[in-house]
Image (spheres, rainbow, N blue to C red):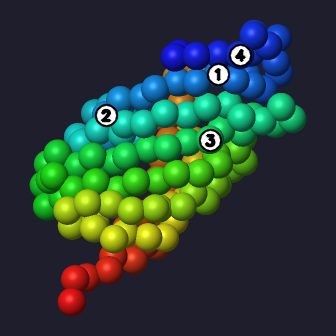
Amino acid sequence: MVAQAPTTNTSTTSFGLVRIIDNPLTKGPTMSSDLLGRAQGFYAFTSLESVGLFMAMNFIFTSGKYNGSTVTILGRDEIFTDVREMPVIGGSGLFRWAQGFVLLQIAFFLQLYRLVFQIISLNRVFKVKKNS
């Protein structure tokens, strides 16, 4: 936890809580899956009425074909919705000029505020503009 509002501890939605992340980015939802890179960014609980997050995240690829490339997503994540759509707002390297969206769902909860996200669609849904 990086910050929280004075009312966070009494809020039913954790309003005001901010967390910074630097987590393994793996091919599958388990830690034994192949490591692809890191998922770095932050999320803030921004809704008073539901568990809704503002999330900014970079997928930083450190191996394989995409080594050195990144994909950036930014948007609202209402985590108790089964499948959520979040915008891809850019990227670097092989993902330069990326745009589109990712579909996310929670694979499982590790503990309160520690979730494992599963990206159900990324490679099929966003377009990469090629330099002319």
**Tag 1, which secondary structure?**
loop
Q: Which mark is residue 54?
A: 3
Marks 1 and 4, the one that precedes in the sequence: 4
Residue neighbourhood size for the residue with mark 4, other residues' Cα within 10 Å, grouped as few (<14), some (14–19), many (≥20):
few
Q: In the rendered structure, which amino acid carries the disc numbered 1?
A: Leu
Mark nearer the viewer, 2 or 4: 4
On the image, which quarter does residue 5 sit in? top right
Mark 4 to mark 3 CA distance (whole Å): 15 Å
Q: Residue drawn at (83%, 21%), measured in percent from left and top?
A: 12
Q: Are marks 1 and 2 in contact (CB under 8 Å)?
A: no
Mark nearer the viewer, 1 or 4: 4
Q: Residue drawn at (35%, 56%), measured in percent from left and top?
A: 71
Mark nearer the viewer, 1 or 2: 1
Q: Which residue position is annotated with label 2? A: 24
Q: In the rendered structure, which amino acid carries the disc numbered 3?
A: Phe
Marks 3 and 1, the one that precedes in the sequence: 1
Mark 1 to mark 4 CA distance (whole Å): 7 Å
Mark nearer the viewer, 4 or 3: 4
Q: Which mark is residue 5?
A: 4
Q: In the rendered structure, which amino acid carries the disc numbered 2?
A: Pro
Mark 3 to mark 1 CA distance (whole Å): 11 Å
Mark 2 to mark 3 CA distance (whole Å): 20 Å
Q: Quadrant of the C terminus?
A: bottom left
Position of 24 with respect to 51 (left or right) is left
Give percent across and percent down for residue 128: 33, 76
Q: Residue drawn at (75%, 10%), measured in percent from left and top?
A: 6
**Tag 2, which secondary structure?**
strand
Q: Which residue position is annotated with label 1? A: 17
Marks 2 and 4, the one that precedes in the sequence: 4
